[in-house]
Amino acid sequence: MPRVFKLYLMSALNGFGISLAFVALILVFNIANLRHLVGTSDIGVLATVAFWILNGIVFSGVQFAWALSQMVRVDPSELDETGR
């Protein structure tokens, strides 16, 4: 398996895990009265799953971008006098 694909897969899993915790905390603390809205609506489960998936996509992208940015290492001896 290529290293970048493995990195992307791990970032996606981390992002969806963070998203699950995020959605759970929002519902536990009843932020913006969402627990009541989800609990009393007939499509509350669908709304919660959609909220989790959409947040998971965002958090996965952030995890992947952060992981890629951390992979770049610049050797100070390769820089010239202007810092480039």
Image (tube, rainbow, N blue to C red):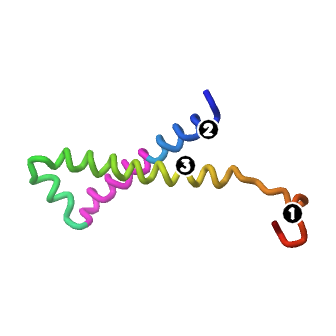
Give percent across and percent down for residue 52: 32, 49
- Amino acid residing under circle 1: Leu
Tell me the residue at 39%/48% (across/down): 56
* Amino acid on which disc 2 is placed: Val
Determine if the magenta segment contains residue 9.
no
Quadrant of the frame with the C terminus: bottom right
Report how far apart the C-alphas of labels 2 and 1 lie in the structure: 27 Å
Say whether disc 2 or disc 3 marks the residue closer to the N-terminus. Answer: 2
Question: Could you say whether the residue bearing mark 2 is in a helix, strand or loop?
Answer: helix
Find disc 3 in the rendering and name its residue: 64
**Residue at x 71%, y 53% (from the top left corner):** 72
Q: Residue at x 59, y 40 (%)?
A: 7
Answer whether labels 1 and 3 touch (C-beta < 8 Å): no
Badge 1: how crowded within 10 Å, few (<14), some, or many (20+)?
Answer: few
Quarter-of-image position of residue 1: top right
Question: Quarter of the image holding residue 22?
Answer: bottom left
Classify mark 3: helix, strand or loop.
helix
Earlier in the chain: of badge 1 and badge 3, it is 3
Mark 3: amino acid: Phe
Is 53 left, or right, of 41 in this rendering? right
Residue extent of the magenta highlight: 16-31
Contact, CB < 8 Å: mark 2 with mark 3? no
- Identify the mark at residue 4; answer none if there is no mark: 2
- The prevailing secondary structure element of the residues shown in magenta is helix
Percent of width and height locating residue 64:
55, 48
The residue carrying mark 1 is 79
